[in-house]
Every structure is written in C-alpha cells, then in structure tokens.
Amino acid sequence: MKINHLTTEKRNQNTLDIDEVTSLEVVRKINTEDKKVPEAIEKVLPEIASVVEQVVAAFRKEGRLIYTGAGTSGRLGILDASECPPTYGTPSEMVIGIIAGGDQAIHTAVEGAEDDIEAGKNDLLNLQLTKNDVVVAIAASGRTPYAIGALKCANEVGAVSVALVCSQDSEMSKVAQHTIAAVVGPEVVTGSTRMKAGTAQKLVLNMISTASMIGIGKVYSNLMVDVQPSNKKLIQRAKNIVMEATGCTHQEAEQALSDHDGYAKAAILQVLTGCSPQEAKDLLKKHKGMLKQALQEKKR
C-alpha cells in the first residue's frame, strides 16, 4: 500500500530539526503550523455551507446527521454528536457518532478496524440508515476503507454522503456526493494526523452541527435557547438566557422557566409577548420551534 503521496503522510520541512531544539522552540513550531488550520478551512467554507444546508433539510424531514470514522476521526465525530443534546436539547438519536471497532475504540485503538470496508457499511445499516439521513465520513487521509464503506452504503440507500478529509483528490472524494477537503499540509510529526488534521476536522464539525442547529431554530440571536438545564451551571445559564433575551428580572426569568420546566425558549416567548404558558407552547409547536416566527405571529 502506497501512502507517501498523501499530504498527511509527507514530511514537514519546517520541523526536520524538532528533536534538536528547545521545548520552547518545539511548541513555537507547533503553534506556527497550527495557524495554518483556519486558513485551510476558510478555503472550503462554501463546501461546508452546502453540507449545512443538506443537514438542515434532513432535520426538517426527521432525518439524522451521522458521523463515522476510525481512530481520531471517529472520536471527533462522537465528541461533536455527544455535545448536541445538552447544548441544543436534541434527542440523542438526532446526531450520532460511530467509530470503527465500536465503543471500545473510543478509549483504546482497535487494530485493523479502519481497514474493514464491510464494517463501515454494516455499522450504518445497523442504524437503519434511510434516505433522509446525512452521513459525514471523516478521515484525514481520505483513503480509509471503513469510511469508504460508509459512503458507499449511504449512496446505495439514497442518503446524502459527505467526505471530510485533509487530502486533495482523495479516494473518498470520488465516492462522496459532497467533499470538504481541509488541506492543512504535512504534520509537525510526520503522519500524526491527530494534530493539524484533527484540529481542522474538529473545527469543521463544530461548524456543521452549530450552523445546522441555527438553521432549525435552536439559537435565538446568539443564545442557545434550547439548552437542557441538567446541572447547576446550565440552570443558571437558562436564567441568564431568558434575562438577556427579554430584559426581565431574575425573579421573572425564574417564574417563566418554572412555567415551562426550565425550557428557555418558551419562557422567552411568554415574557416577550405576555401570552399564557399554554399559548407559548402552542405557538412554538405551530412554528416547529422557530422562536422568531412565533414572535412575529404574536406581534401581528
């Protein structure tokens, strides 16, 4: 198997002496290379936005966003998926992360798992993949068999298939309907794609999930109005969100939140319009959770 041609496997000419310099110089070199990551992502913003539009459309059809990958790439998908429920109040099955080798591979490398193309397909079929879903296969090299199997499965089912890679003209890009190629260049330590490539993947996944949640009304202005108040910090955040959005007092925010079991979005609608708790719930349901649309109707 030849991989030397891959950008992620090339030697970085700026770090050939990294084993000879001081610790300060080592971290300075790493920092210099890390600065290239947002520049690489800036070049593919249109591709990211296109994928976001696909995800928003999928969510509106009760479809899912499914991340899949091996190693670091798989773990990053799981991380992004796991943070959506507490931040945006989504059900756990709305954004899903799967990793080659199963749950064990989250903590410990499962050797050979990334080379199983059939597993990439079967793991998606086990989720009852449908044409309403979006599958984002993640692999820095763009050649991981497990990820390719996932993309092929998505295409066969009729789901939207997306390759998130860090190499140009990759094998995965030839299979996927959409490709996001954040080419960050050779790593500080040759082939250590948990570094720049992993950072790029994390930033792109942040963009996809965040922008998609904004698209379906999970954010009002820049406030996470669907936050789940599941601990003391988030309970206080919900109160702060209601006060920020409405200008009400702490006591008024507490009362409105109490009327809605801690649900900030409905509390905001109630405070801003003076409607009853039930009317706030009905309006949000009518407008599928879009707070601004509910407010506009109430103001007419």
Image (cartoon, helix red, strand yellow):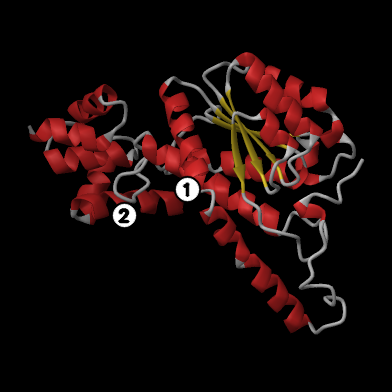
Q: Secondary structure at mark 2?
A: helix
Q: Is residue 102 visible?
A: no
* Quadrant in the picture for residue 261: top left
Nearer the observer, 1 or 27:
1
Q: Nearer the viewer, mark 2 or mark 1?
A: 2
Looking at this view, name the residue that lies furthest to the right: 1
**Rendering coords of residue 138 (x, y %):** 68, 40
Q: Is residue 84 left or right of residue 245?
A: right
Tell me the residue that label 1 is attached to.
231
Label 2, residues with CA under 10 Å away: few <14, some 14-19, many ≥20:
many
- Residue 2 spot, x, y in % from top left: 90, 44
Q: Is residue 161 left or right of residue 257?
A: right
Residue 222 drawn at (x, y percent): 34, 51
Question: Mark 2 highlights which residue?
Answer: 240
Disc 1 residue type (three-letter): Asn
User: Above or below — where is 125 with respect to 99?
Assistant: above
Question: Distance from label 2 to label 1 (Cα)?
Answer: 14 Å
Residue at image coords 77%, 66%: 188
In this rendering, is residue 211 above or below 58? Answer: below
Residues 195 and 250: in front is: 195
Label 1 neighbour load within 10 Å: few <14, some 14-19, many 20+: few
Horizontal side, residue 139 vs residue 292: left or right: right
Quarter assignment of residue 226? top left
